[in-house]
Image (cartoon, helix red, strand yellow):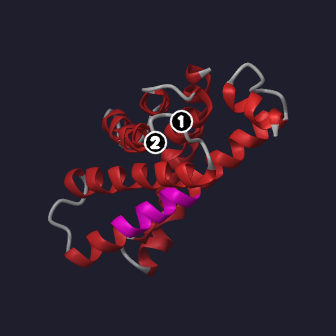
Amino acid sequence: MASVIGVAVGVVFWAWGAVWTPVSAPIQALLPGLQAAPAAVWLIAGVLGGLIIRKPGAAVYTELVAATVSALIGTQWGWLTIESGLVQGLGAEIVFAIFLYRNWRLPVALLAGAGAGLAMAINDLILSFAGAAPMFAVVYTVSAVVGGAVIAGGLSWLAMRGLARAGALDRFAAGRELRAV
């Protein structure tokens, strides 16, 4: 299931990358650094994988598979996409680990998304925006964390619940938990 999530979201990542410049350019023009908020789409695989699989390493694995699929299909960032996936997956994984892989409620999903967003911001500020102005770095980081919480955390939690309601997760704790309520 983790591989299926990773491959499916990897195709979404690739599609998001294909439309990234026309989507991000006006946002960046509005306030440089704000483009990190919609970049949080690239954080979904790790949070969703962690919420569904609920085992150590699931967030890193699904994010890494998604990034690899995206890179193999072809992105403007090439193989650096895989490094980004690893770092972003670790951001979500650390949050799930802090909660000892036992809490899968919305607040934890939001924190996992925020953790992935923070990891994305740190990675991007080092590799893509080295030497950026302090104001840009602050706007970029805040946008990445908020975007990560809302987009990767919130939307992944809603997707997990929707899949569980549809019965697609009946074999997993995520599906059984929702059915028990």
Res 121 label = none
Res 99 label = 2
Please name the residue shown 46% across and 68% down the image: 25
Residue 22 horizontal/vertical position (percent): 53, 62
Name the element at disc 2. loop
Residue 126, located in which quarter of the rendered image? bottom left
Residue 146 among those drawn in magenta? yes
Residue holding disc 1: 102
Q: Nearer the viewer, residue 14 or 59?
A: 59
Q: Residue furthest left?
A: 131
Along the horizontal axis of the image, is 81 left or right of 37?
left
Q: What residue type is labelled 1?
A: Arg
Residue 172 horizontal/vertical position (percent): 69, 23
The main secondary structure of the magenta stretch is: helix
Please name the residue shown 74% across and 42% down the image: 161
Name the element at disc 1. loop
Quadrant of image for the N terminus: top right
Q: Is residue 86 visible?
A: yes
Q: What residue type is labelled 2?
A: Phe
Q: How crowded is mark 1: few (under 14 residues within 10 Å), some or many (20 or more)?
A: few
Q: Measured along the vertical axis of the image, is residue 121 above or below residue 70?
A: below
Along the horizontal axis of the image, is 22 left or right of 120?
right
Residue 69 horizontal/vertical position (percent): 49, 27
Q: Distance between the residues labelled 1 and 2?
A: 6 Å
Along the horizontal axis of the image, is 175 left or right of 8?
right
Please name the residue shown 50% across and 29% down the image: 62
Mark 1–mark 2 contact, CB under 8 Å?
A: yes
Q: Which of 64 and 77 is in front in this view?
A: 64
Magenta span covers which residues?
A: 141-150
Residue 61 horizontal/vertical position (percent): 45, 26
Q: Is residue 36 visible?
A: no
Q: Measured along the vertical axis of the image, is residue 13 above or below residue 149?
A: above
